[in-house]
Amino acid sequence: MIDAQQLTKIYKVHKRPPGLAAALRSLWSRPTTEVRAVDGVSFHIEPAERVGFLGPNGAGKTTSLKMLSGLLHPTSGKVVVAGHVPQKRAHAFLKQITLVMGQKQQLMWDLPPSETFLLNRSIYDIPKRAYDETVAELTALLELEDLLGKPTRQLSLGERMKCELACALLHRPKVLFLDEPTIGLDVQMQATVRKFIRSYNERFQATVLLTSHYMDDVAALCPRVIVIDHGHLIHDGPLDELVKRTRPDKRLKLRFSREVEERELQGLGSVVERAPTSAVLVVTQAELQGAVQRAMATLPLVDLSVEDPPLEDVMRDLFAHGRAIQAVGT
């Protein structure tokens, strides 16, 4: 469904020092530097896959999504989405994709969402029967019954985001490019949006490419992740494989029936969190079995669980490692 080969985007950026003299000089001479926002990125995504597209701020994620959706032309490389070259902006291509950006909106501020829905129906030439069925289905899935008639400016951020998603999916696209769809939403609303994205993917076999700084979004939706940093692809594969490769240690979560002193935890692993009746320890894979056996034999346990390290820690370590390699290279 999506095939990118050596995708590259280079911007020419003018830089000048502050001050009036520098501003005047820039009228005649504007030296520029090249910024490689995306540098030789290649990947292939099958139909109906849900893939996380991750990276720190400035890594090139949004630039990549804009090239995949045809908003930007790549400097070099090739990309094909749903059998089309995105930058040609063919009508058949545009009817198969949607791009949802959490920091942008298409809803008209002073009009209710239902008016924007009707506008999109005309833009995409959706037959009335299909439109009515889709609106009814999306309204039920996202619980929009009480929102469609209110002016957009009177909706909360979470309510607007739900209407934005519905508006973007009226034409039932087969490819969803989602750029921070849960940004600014509370925990309950994030869970609602995640549930909806998964449901849409499964019901319509739609391909989903998701960027998010909320790792809960990625863990809940994306079995596979593509990670880029400084425009370069540094990982493409299963999420659990990335976790094992970057942070092979485990977290041992313990709850006790009485207060436990720190000396009683010595020899089990590195203590990262501790309260009078609970503790969290980091244990290597090789030491895990022995640590569990010693904890069960020596501590007043009420509960014990073994978990992977938080995904936020995994990503932080991955990016730190990448920056260290880049620093050595330069």
Image (cartoon, helix red, strand yellow):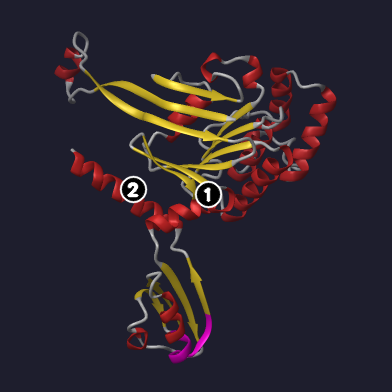
x and y percentages locating residue 157 in the rendered image: 58, 43
Could you say whether the residue bearing mark 2 is in a helix, strand or loop? helix
- Relative placement, left or right, of 154 versus 3 is right
Q: CA distance from mark 2 to mark 1?
A: 17 Å
Q: Quadrant of residue 146?
A: top right
Q: N-terminal of the two: label 2 or label 1?
A: 1
Residue at the (55%, 35%) spot, across then down: 45
Residue at the (69%, 35%) spot, across then down: 166
Q: Is residue 78 above or below residue 190?
A: above
x and y percentages locating residue 88 in the rendered image: 54, 14
- Relative placement, left or right, of 287 versus 150 is left
- Relative placement, left or right, of 233 versus 296 is left
Which residue, given by chain and number where applicable, does mark 1 sit on?
Answer: 218
Q: Amino acid at mark 2?
A: Phe
Point out the residue furthest to the top here: 28
- Relative placement, left or right, of 326 versus 85 is left
What segment is highlighted magenta in the picture? Answer: 295-303
Q: In front: 68, or 284? A: 284
Q: Quadrant of residue 58?
A: top left
Q: Quadrant of the N terminus?
A: top right
Could you say whether the residue bearing mark 1 is in a helix, strand or loop? helix
x and y percentages locating residue 257 in the rendered image: 51, 89
Which residue, given by chain and number where applicable, does mark 2 sit on?
Answer: 319
Q: Is residue 192 above or below residue 67?
A: below
> Are there few (<14), some (14-19), or many (20+) residues within 10 Å of tag 1?
many
Residue at the (46%, 81%) spot, across then down: 292
Residue 268 visible, this orientation:
yes
Q: Quadrant of residue 259?
A: bottom left
Q: Is residue 193 above or below residue 135?
A: below
Point out the residue furthest to the right here: 129
